[in-house]
Image (cartoon, rainbow, N blue to C red):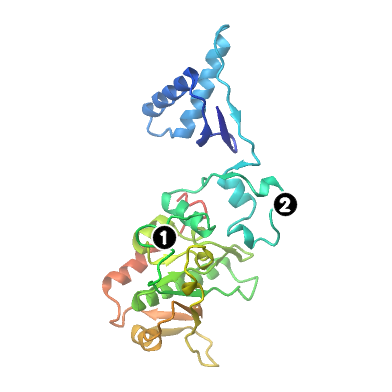
Amino acid sequence: MAALWDKIEFNAGFLVVKPSALSQRLYQMIRRISNSSRRTDDQKALNRAIRKMKKRVKRSEHGRVLTVNVLDRSQFVTGLSYFEKSGRLFPRFDNSRGPSNKSESPLVVHNNWIVTKEAKIYRFREHLMWLYDGDNQYYSSETRNYLTYINVNPRSSSAAAKYVVERELSALKSALAVGHLLNRVVILPRFHCGVRHRECPLNSLIHIQTFDSVFSGLYRESSFLRHTKVPDSVKQGVRDRRFHLHNNQTSDILVSGTDVMSLFSELNDKVLKLNDLLPVRIDTNDGSFDHEFSSKLKSAFRRSRYRQLH
């Protein structure tokens, strides 16, 4: 057997197994270990079974040996190595330089070290590694309309990280409210994390599974318009618009649903780009929004970190 090495142990999710009596015995033992405790996942069971079989061989002079090797670590890499340790939070071509060796251009990336199916899919999509279009034509729809915006880099490096995150999540709520009124899917911007305000994806800030339980299908990842399946009519149909602020405007502005409709409802462009939404607050209590949508905004934003462990 040869398996991907997962930092300190063999990975149970990506491995090659020769169909032999010994490997069958290994998997029978894995099943017994897994069934004995609900707290033991498949990876713990695999590594425990390997250790037990090796001990049994040592006790027997004539025992056959189960050979377990590690797959080439530069070609078969974990999500921890590929995404996090390399600082690769967005598609590879966004790096200042291309891959210069095998370790930067592996054969297989295991999308692990991140929790929940929804978060795994979101990360694959953000990195342009997801091709499934689905029955709803996630990428290829020619009839769906979108809106997008940007999160400008914080002007001061001394701005508190917590303050920046709160402002950007508030802007996302405004974008979702506008998208709800205009029947447009929101294309996410990039967010900013940490004291250095480094660009980061949404899973660095909130729990994707919780967010998807409310807004699945109503948003797209920030790299969406770069995907090969997105029609040219969408990619080329971007129109810049913005909420007009007074020249002397220093505080946030409160915009009603009625204002949103009067400003943008007649526009037929495929992608409406609203630019910076940080100073914009949408009044969801003006009668344009039902109580259900207001409740969704409150329940969808559960804070989390990149690996989505909590």
The residue lying at 59 percent from left, 65 percent from top is 199
Residue 69: quadrant of the picture: top right
**x and y, in percent, of residue 71 in the image:** 61, 34
Disc 2 residue type?
Ser
**Which comes before the other along the chain, label 2 or label 1?**
2
Residue 161 vs residue 142, the one in the foreground: 142
Q: Which residue is mark 2?
A: 100
The residue lying at 47 percent from left, 18 percent from top is 21
Residue 242 vs residue 124, the one in the foreground: 124
Give the spatial CA distance, label 2 vs label 1.
39 Å
| Disc 2 packing (10 Å; few <14; some 14–19; many ≥20) | few
Mark 1 element type: loop
Q: Which residue is mark 1?
A: 302
Disc 1 residue type?
Arg
Residue 62 vs residue 278, the one in the foreground: 62
Residue 61: quadrant of the picture: top right
Q: Residue furthest bottom?
A: 247
Side of 80 relative to 35 (left or right):
right
**x and y, in percent, of residue 293 in the image:** 31, 71
The residue lying at 45 percent from left, 22 percent from top is 24
Residue 146 vs residue 284, the one in the foreground: 146
**x and y, in percent, of residue 288 in the image:** 30, 81
